[in-house]
Image: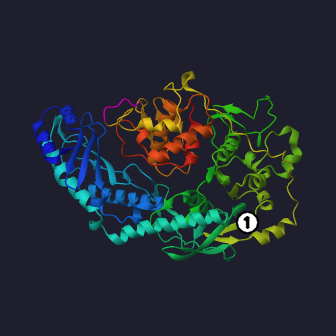
Amino acid sequence: MKSSNELRTLLRSIDHKSYPAYKSLAGGYQFGSYQLFIDHVQGDPFASPSSLHMELPHKEAGFPEAYLKKGCSRIALEDFLTRQFASQVEDFNFKAKGSGKSGLIAITRCGQEVLERSACQITDTKVIVRFHVGFPAFGRTINAGELEKILFDFLPVCAEKSLLFRRLDKKRVEQAVFLAEDQETVRQILKDEKLAGFVANGSILPRKSGVSDLPMKDSVAFVSPKSMERTFSLPHRGEITGMAVPAGITLIVGGGYHGKSTLLDALQMGVYNHIAGDGREFVITDQTAVKLRAEDGRSIRNVDISLFINDLPNKKDTTSFSTPDASGSTSQAAGVVEGIEAGSHLFLIDEDTSATNFMVRDDFMQQVISREKEPITPFLERARELYENADISTILVAGSSGAFFYIADKILQMDCYRPVDITERVKELCKEHKTPRIQAPGFKIPDFRRELGAVNGKGVAGRAYSVASAGAEKYGQSGGRNGSSRRHDTMKVKTMGRDGFSLDRENVDLRYVEQLADSEQLSGLAYLLRYGLEQVIDGKRTVQQTVQILWELLERKGWEPFSGAYIPCGLAKPRKQELFACLNRYRG
């Protein structure tokens, strides 16, 4: 490890040289209480900025050991430190002058959700913060004086004000950690008591606008119907009261613009913890929940959709169905089956974004078009079986068909953004109307043995992979910081916001995977998929086996095995359900 004085001397020796001379700075340097690593130097001042990271031992950082033990506490602290570092570097961003991206200092901009990110990582021994710096230049000539300001004046201030516990507002740190621990307690209660979700009284569900995830000002606060109200005891907050959504089939109805979709949107993002002040801090949903919708044009490969679609006129086999251009009903049928395969125990569905012919067929239509002439078994006829035979609950927003009233366990009417339990009243009305005919053939959960096809017949890397061999991926053995040849940067990754990403020339369209909260999760999925293509997929493993290998490796070793010579800032951990969705939508 070189000293900071050596870095200063080296920096001054390359002043006014050609920009590529900056690459000689790569390496690690001791700066008092922390170590600074220059991982990657940009090729010119107009290219993507350079990647750096700081490492601070716990002895220097000084955070209470209790904050580092639990997974939820550690992730909350990482999120808090990322936000603190971001606010500090904002004061110095572009204060150093030059051409192109000269003077840029940037780290992840966190949203309302608390996600596990590569930007800040707390290990057993230290705190690591990763960020980007635009190395200053005059044209394409090194401006060492301006970079010296960044490295020796700006960054030490940012580190001291954001990474040292003694310099932070201890109450705010404690509140962030305690909130996460309370949220985790509610999640455990959902599991223990077989609940699908919980919405605390006083929650603010509407968002500021279609492009802002901030809470809407002056909006109606959520209040639970008395019949569904539960009170839980939390370790830090004490008692909290709100609406407990039971397992089973819950229907959300009401007039237009009364808040049906707003409630469902809040529940679909309740799979993540939210920061204080978001309004949805205690909107907590089963963590395996999957939002289902129609996706016209998506790719489907070898999916058994026979639960919903059978006896096609072209005699195509629906027990192993493939198409590069699915219809709305076919895509939604595949989504249900893929959700079961991904281990989901809760489906969230909005009638507005569903294929009508997949969801329901009324009695008149069944009389006109007989069962023998209709290959689709609608979701209406499978929802009860999914719950009773596969332990999968459904929360459904409906506005046009009353057929779902007959199978619902709970019926909520949204009235001016306030939920009203109308279950008993509707069930009495159901007795006055003819029950919809349900003639679904026998229910059988598909046997999930579909294999991912090998790339070029043998996988990109041409070799098999097992979790046991993951130890060979450590830095210094098969690659990384100590002069490596790891392959994980051979396929070029480009993330397109929250719409998808590309690996080389192959696009992965994820715009309809609505529970992806951040573009960094898409970057994370791209890294996982790239590794899978290069190291895991060999034409023999099933989708479930492939996901399990990738997930176990991510859980045990973080982003290190999936990165090249260094772990970049800008990756966020997705859920396992989104990893399944990514693999299922990769056309390559």
Q: Nearer the viewer, residue 583 or 252?
A: 583
Q: Position of residue 381 (x, y in %)?
A: 80, 51
Q: Is residue 462 magenta?
A: no
Residue lying farthest top? 457
Q: At 70% from the left edge and 71% from the top edge, which residue is drawn?
A: 421
> In this picture, is 570 found above or below 208?
above
Which residues fall within the magenta stretch? 482-486
> Image quadrant of residue 311?
top right
**Amino acid type of the residue tagged 1 in the rendering:** Lys
Q: At 44% from the left edge and 45% from the top edge, which residue is drawn?
A: 557
Q: At 60% from the left edge and 38% from the top edge, which residue is drawn?
A: 545
Q: Please give the residue where the numbered disc 1 appears in the rendered image.
A: 410
Point out the image quarter for the N terminus.
top left
Q: Nearer the viewer, residue 25 or 154?
A: 25
Badge 1 local density, few (<14 within 10 Å), some, or many (20+)?
many
Is residue 320 something that shows in the picture?
Answer: yes
> Image quadrant of residue 485?
top left
